[in-house]
Amino acid sequence: MPRHRTNHSIAAPRRWIFPKLAAFGSSIMLLGVMLAVYPLTASWFSQYHQSALIARVADEQKGLPSQQIDTRIAEAREYNRLLVGGVIVEANQNKASANVESEGRFDYYSLLNGSSAVMGRLRIDTIDVDLPIYHGTSDATLAKGVGHLRGTALPVGGRSQRPVLTAHRGLPESTLFNDLDRVALGDTFVIETFGEVLTYRVVDTQVIDPADTESISVVDGKDLVSLITCTPLGVNTHRILVTGERITPTPIADVERAGNTPDLPGFPWWAVFAGLAVVACVVTVWHAGYAEARKSRGAAAHEPSA
């Protein structure tokens, strides 16, 4: 005689219940992690694009005929010779500006300018800076790299010259000059432009008042470059001023590194951290859940009605 299976002999299907409190708590934790890694993420991608641009410009300049490179440098030096200008560093502003009286017979934006509109490259190894240098100091320019202050000498070296390079500090999406205050006396930085490799040793670091233009004026007979950024963060009432004096001859190590692909931004550890946070949140919610048996249709049909 065949046996008849009852509904009770069939395992009732089960569903996994996730406590709302655990899901909410994990979501808040995940949101906090995402907010924490956002500056690292944005800065990493910014450095990645800056490094890619620097590498592209280096390849472009290596392919130029030597005569064309010599002409570019000669024009820049003639521009510097004819230049008469001054620098203004206004209070409550996030960048310096220039008071240009005369630029001679040259178009500023055509000098030291290739197809990528990049003037050169600035490396400060002690604070992991490797950035493109652009013409001018507009907000759009300073959002993507270092700006050359129009009205100061172009960065091609020379006695009685003092180019001024400026960049933002404190942007959440890009590092730029965030750590310029950590540069110390004796540190070096390197400028590369159209085959020229210029190394500068830091001889002065100070915080200047906006009205102090003497600190960034040309020094007769000195081959200097000044780096400027705003301080304190978010207030911008003063300026960090780092000045370097050129080392001649250029150290062979810097010459050999010229045109190399930037080492930055490095491995994106922030992605590993964010991934682990996502996994931790999923595991937390899963382990906080529990199985609940669903009632089968047959079982529901056998339940007595009220």
Image: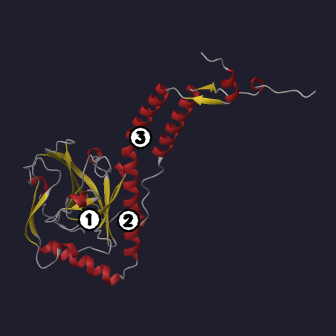
Task: Judge whether residue 252 can be spotted in this image.
Answer: no
Q: Callout 2: few (<14), some (14-19), or many (20+) C-alpha neighbours within 10 Å?
A: some
Distance from the alpha carbon under mark 3 to that under mark 1? 32 Å
Identify which residue is drawn at 31% across, 46% down.
Answer: 172
Residue under pointer 1:
134
Report the front residue among 196 and 302. Answer: 302
Question: Mark 2: which amino acid?
Answer: Leu
Q: Element type at marker 2? A: helix
Residue under pointer 2:
53
Q: Element type at marker 3? A: helix
Say whether disc 1 or disc 2 marks the residue closer to the N-terminus: 2
Q: The C terminus appears in which quarter of the rendering?
A: top right
Q: Which label number is shown at residue 245?
A: none
Q: The N terminus appears in which quarter of the rendering?
A: top right
Question: Mark 1: which amino acid?
Answer: Tyr
Identify the image quadrant of residue 129.
bottom left
Q: Element type at marker 1? A: strand
Say whether disc 3 or disc 1 marks the residue closer to the N-terminus: 3
Identify the image quadrant of residue 135.
bottom left
